[in-house]
Amino acid sequence: MKFDTPVTTNPIDQLKVVGKPIHRIDGELKTTGKAMYAYEWHDPNTPYVYGYPVGSTIAKGRIKTMNVDAAKRAPGVLAVVTTLDVGKREKGKFNTASLFGGDEIQHYHQAIAVVVAETFEQARAAANLVKVDYAEDKGVYDLAEAMKSAVKPKDAGGAPPDTAVGDFEGAFKSAPVALDETYSTPDQSHSMMEPHASIAAWDGEEITVWTSSQMIDWWRSDLATTLGIDKEKIHLMSPFIGGGFGGKLFLRVDAVLAAFGAKAAKRPVKVALPRPFIPNNTTHRPATIQRLRIGASRDGKITAIAHESWSGDQPGGQLETAAMQTRLLYAGENRMTAMRLATLDLPEGNAMRAPGEAPGLMALEIAMDEMAEKLGMDPVHFRILNDTQVDPEKPERPFSHRDLVGCLKLGAERFGWGGRGRPGTRREGKWMIGTGVAAAFRNNLLIPSGARVRLDRQGIVTVETDMTDIGTGSYTIIAQTAAEMMGLPIDKVAVQLGDSRFPVSAGSGGQFGANCSTSGVYAACVKLREAVIERLGLNASDVAFENGAVRSGTRSVSLGEAAGPDGLVGEDKIEWEKLSESHQQSTFGAHFVEVGVDVATGETRIRRMLAVCAAGRILNPITARSQVIGAMTMGAGLALSEELAVDTSLGFFVNHDLAGYEVPVHADIPYQEVIFMNETDPMSSPMKAKGIGELGLCGVSAAIANAIYNATGVRLRNYPMTLDKLIGGLPDVA
Ligand code: MOS
């Protein structure tokens, strides 16, 4: 199905099942421990063995020699496969640094061997016996230093790295009110609950891999390239995933090590990356340094806005596209954005939840708060005043639907924004209290997505797609979609996901999963409806699918009967055309936060959070809310604690576990509220939905930063906003 014109009405608009607060259909499997995550697949008749990775202890250089004699002699060891044994491999399309193979070391904890043994403990013990002799090179690890030689990359995630409209420099110089400040965000780690883990089992030349992947088809292709085998020989399964946040978008080394280990040991091998190995071995969100310049007239209209951002990555790597949202979020006739890429020898930087916008808004939305203050204007009002209904760089291009103003207004009302005091004036005992606001913005990406739906003689519809559910609720919204399309209650729909034998879907990433995968299921259901109509010889123009039956005139046939003994199948793929070129598709929101800052210690505690989101039709308010509160929680971490600390001489992330890399826990988040604007976007898809999972993160950290400022009068511009940065500016307490 080509989606090239805005939808009018379709069966989804009935909203008998779609849009309803239905609990996760996989919830029981998960809460009873029956949902099998990658490492847990266990066939009692299969003699699994265990692989343990060995990581490089230098960040840059070359391996001269490896001695694995002692490891091979250790108890229970079946095989040791080293990076030298497998030789240099062709890199997968989506990885910047090589995962495994050859003698070159590109980053700390790069995998250099896997030890396979009868038990996990034996493999781990033997891995410690591998001896390596390195020729070490000097690397570059400090972004603040490396940014001086940063270059303009060819590309910023498919967009140009620079844009300019009007005369920014001139307008900025002559602006009566102006801001020029620099902000920074640190390297951040996905820190999903489930570590990267894979089981590989060879059957002759064919291999089955159970893994934890957001994108089945990308992994399959890249694993084929890395192993040097035909993609068709790989069967990949990832039906349940314990979080990804972008860290499982691209093939990781656990799958590669399991495959090589299983080949060498001639046994199915399980490999989980140990937690302390993950931050340096896998990807992270790169640190940024961002300069914001904003000029405005005295009445608060932005006349000039510039956003420059610097980030670093491995040679051949990519930008953290932190200036992107500034091209679209606020009006202003004179504007420029520029993003520069430095070469760093730190582990590979890559996508983490809302890549670009999350760190970009962490800077931009503090700058907006600072500008509002310079103007003596309420920050909600300042944002409303500078709203735009068209792409400010290409005014002929409107937004498909944009309700940032509605989010800000409703949020201000519900939050009780009006009673806000001047910075540093509200006290409750030892707590300095403040509130902050920020806009949320994230684009709505469209990726082709396929599905197959089977109708059986019991009237059960089974959906098959390689879509993944990374905790987001894909199983449930896909079941809701098929139920709505076929006129069934949700318990008559079964959903099978995450298997490379199923049609290729959009996968889970970039908050495109929900809208795109359900649209693929919609397309497949249209085909299944046609098959039913054709089988029964009905007149398509007066057919209704409802209550488990298809009705035409006075004739009603149950779907089970229509399916017949062999059943019926519909398969299709949604493909997107034109609409996203003529119209900018984005999602919008507003975050409001209240914090208390301990006047003696500088400790910040969040007191309450509110997000108002405008993201098209909400397919399921329970799973959508869960996405947004999870994202708000992540935003609290990015504001207050999360930072991969770089050892700039040895070139690695020092706090590489969940003891040192601090993410929020329940006690950090006492109260969250989420409001969805009641809207649809007929240009986004047949579902009229858009993404929500990343929007919830966008802006929230800046709202916290702005609340800290309002509480204390101390303006911080470098994340995370830890006690040490605040305490010097707090009032003296005797
Ligand atoms: Mo997302 S960072 O594309 O999983």
Image (cartoon, rainbow, N blue to C red):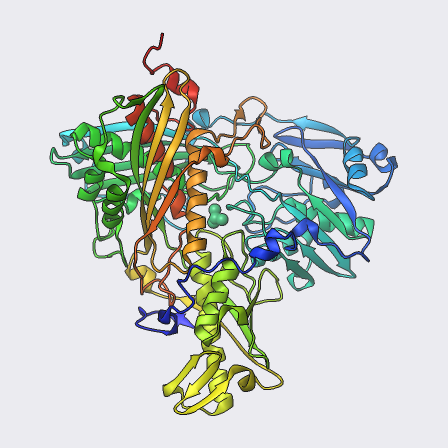
State left or right for residue 682 relative to residue 545. left
Q: Residue 502: give x, y in percent of width and height.
A: 59, 67
Q: Is residue 70 above or below residue 35?
A: above
State left or right for residue 313 relative to residue 152. right
Which residue occupies the foreground of this view, 188 or 168?
A: 188
Q: Residue 478: give x, y in percent of width and height.
A: 49, 64
State left or right for residue 296 relative to residue 672. left
Q: What residue is shown at x 67% (from left), y 32% (from top)?
A: 56
Residue 37 can be seen, yes or no: yes
Q: What residue is shown at x 31% (from left), y 49% (from top)?
A: 588
Q: Quadrant of residue 360?
A: top left
Q: Residue 674: give x, y in percent of width and height.
A: 36, 47
Q: Residue 433: give x, y in percent of width and height.
A: 31, 26
Which residue occupies the foreground of this view, 151 or 433?
A: 433
Q: Residue furthest left?
A: 299
Q: Residue furthest top?
A: 734
Residue 573 can be seen, yes or no: no
Which quadrant is home to the C terminus? top left
Which residue occupies the foreground of this view, 36 or 259?
A: 36
> How many marks can you see?
0
Q: What residue is shown at x 46% (from left), y 78% (from top)?
A: 547
Which quadrant is home to the N terminus? bottom left
Which residue occupies the foreground of this view, 431 or 510?
A: 431
Q: Quadrant of residue 206?
A: bottom right
